[in-house]
Amino acid sequence: MRLGRLGFLLATSTAAGAALGLGYWPTIRWAGPGSGSAALAGSVVGLLASWVGAAPFLLTSRRTSRLVAPMVLASTALRSFAAMVTAVGLALSDCFPVAPLLIWVAISYTVLLPIDVAFAMGFARQAIARGSA
């Protein structure tokens, strides 16, 4: 699956929204009325982490095969770091119930991972097809 920049942003937003739509009411039922905002915040953390992780691909115009491995590694590190720092910050802020927040960070991170991988693979295939060294 080849995703362009806009396609990536739309796919990740749609997937995060769909996951939240499916799990919002069960979360409220499980963790109480205040957990809805934690579910939303956790989904946003995963979405933002996905977008931050895609930055090396979204911001470059050079698509050469020698840049593929460093960009994939940078993307993975940025995504993980953004999710971890944001989730820990929100968990320590006492603005949201911690358990539903962290569960939804994990859910959204996992739901968005295949889209991130597809986007990175599309970038890699395009670079390799060009045969740039």
Image: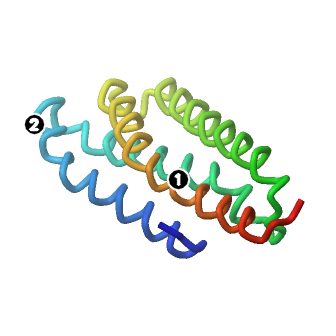
Q: Quadrant of residue 78?
A: top right
Q: Position of residue 62 (x, y in %)?
A: 84, 68
Mark 1 residue crowding within 10 angstroms, few (<14) / some (14–19) / many (20+): many
User: Left or right of 123: which side holds 61?
Assistant: right
Q: Amino acid at mark 2?
A: Arg
Q: Which of these two is toward me, 71 or 126?
A: 126
User: Left or right of 131: which side holds 99?
Assistant: left
Figure colour scheme: rainbow
Judged from this view, the residue extending furthest toward the right is: 133
Element assignment for label 1: helix
In the picture shown, does residue 15 fall above or below 126?
Answer: above
Q: Position of residue 20 (x, y in %)?
A: 27, 52
- Dot 2 or dot 1: first in sequence order is 2
Q: Amino acid at mark 1?
A: Asp
The residue pinned by badge 1 equals 116
In the picture shown, does residue 107 fall above or below 115?
Answer: above
Q: Position of residue 118 (x, y in %)?
A: 51, 57
Element assignment for label 2: helix
User: Left or right of 124: which side holds 101?
Assistant: left
Tell me the number on the disc at residue 29. 2
Labels 2, 1: front one: 1
Judged from this view, the residue extending furthest toward the left is: 29
For the C terminus, which image quadrant?
Answer: bottom right
Q: Quadrant of residue 124?
A: bottom right
Q: CA distance from mark 2 to mark 1?
A: 31 Å
Q: Position of residue 29 (x, y in %)?
A: 10, 36
Q: Residue at x 31, y 42 (%)?
A: 39
Q: Which of these two is toward me, 50 or 69?
A: 69
Tell me the number on the disc at residue 73. none
Q: Which of these two is toward me, 5 or 17?
A: 5
Q: Residue at x 44, y 50 (%)?
A: 114
